[in-house]
Amino acid sequence: MLMVVAYDITDPRRLRQVAKHCEDYGIRVQYSVFECRLEAGYFEEFWSGLMDLIEPEEDRIVAYRICATCAAEIRSGGIMQNTEKQKAVCYVF
């Protein structure tokens, strides 16, 4: 499952924590945008971890699920990393 996750975090400390959490599950495609290819069961774990890091009254996170058909049609240009050939991943600590 491909999820595109974007965020706007007001506090620099929380921003670093959210970015690190996203790096553990996906690939950064823009400064505050990640592509996460996860097995369905791992997304809830990932999302729960994000919710624990943010301040709901100040921060915003959004995740968009991209269906397999639509994911095959993703286009990118420039120096962006191509994530379409990656397998679903999950990091366990």
Image (tube, grey):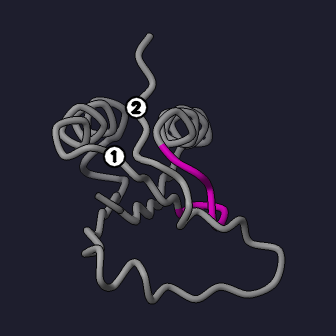
Amino acid, disc 2: Cys
User: Residue 38: which disc?
Assistant: 1
SS for tag 2? loop
Query: Closest to the observer: 54 or 32?
Result: 32
Left or right position of 31 against 84: right
In percent of width and height, residue 92 lies at 41, 16
Query: Closest to the observer: 2 or 86?
Result: 86
Amino acid, disc 1: Leu
**Region of the chain picked out in magenta, as a range:** 26-33
Sequence-earlier tag: 2 or 1: 1
Left or right position of 10 against 49: right
Residue 3 belongs to the span the image colors magenta: no
Direction right: furthest residue: 79
Left or right position of 63 against 73: left
Marks 2 and 1, how far apart at CA: 6 Å
Q: Quadrant of residue 31?
A: bottom right
Rate crowding at label 1 as few (under 14), some (14 to 19) or many (20 or more) other CA atoms within 10 Å. Answer: some
**How would you classify the magenta stretch by its main secondary structure?**
strand
Mark 2 — residue? Answer: 90
In percent of width and height, residue 79 lies at 83, 74
Residue 32 belongs to the span the image colors magenta: yes
Query: Closest to the observer: 92 or 14?
Result: 92
Do the residues bearing badges 2 and 1 touch, measured as CB atoms within 8 Å? yes
